[in-house]
Amino acid sequence: MNTDRNSRYLSQDIHFFAAALSETLVSVWEEDPASVYVEIERGYIECYTPDVVRIRNEETGYLTHYSRDTAMFQRM
């Protein structure tokens, strides 16, 4: 098992806190209708709660909220 690859995924509050504090670029993945995860956005964590993560888009600056239950977050 590649631990470096697994350490890139954000799942705990401390992961989101560190990524937000360091302004780390984050990739957001969601499942498509074929049950395959696809990258839907890249950006920076603006805010997070136990249920939702708010991402500021890398290119446009728009803010989008993603459920922590349905989306997967990965450090770039």
Image (cartoon, helix red, strand yellow):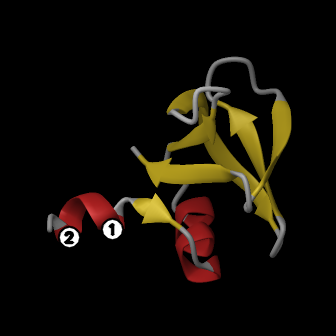
Which residue lies at the image location 84% right of the left edge and 68% below the top edge?
Answer: 51
- Three-letter code, disc 2: Thr
The relative height of residue 21 versus residue 53 in the rendered view (above or below) is below
On the rendered structure, is 30 left or right of 46? left
Q: Considering depth in this image, is 73 or 17 the residue closer to the camera?
A: 73
Q: Is the C-beta separation of discs 1 and 2 under 8 Å?
A: yes
Mark 2 nearby-residue class (10 Å; few <14, some 14–19, many ≥20): few
Residue at numbered disc 1: 7
x then y, percent, for residue 20: 62, 61
Q: Quadrant of the N terminus?
A: bottom left
Label 2 sits on a secondary structure element that is helix
The relative height of residue 1 versus residue 5 in the rendered view (above or below) is below
Residue at numbered disc 2: 3
On the rendered structure, is 60 left or right of 24? right
On the rendered structure, is 49 left or right of 69? right
Quote the CA–CA distance across marks 1 and 2: 6 Å
Q: Give me the disc on residue 55.
A: none
Mark 1 nearby-residue class (10 Å; few <14, some 14–19, many ≥20): few
Q: Quadrant of residue 58?
A: top right
Q: Considering depth in this image, is 64 or 33 the residue closer to the camera?
A: 33
x then y, percent, for residue 67: 80, 54
- Three-letter code, disc 1: Ser
x then y, percent, for residue 18: 53, 71
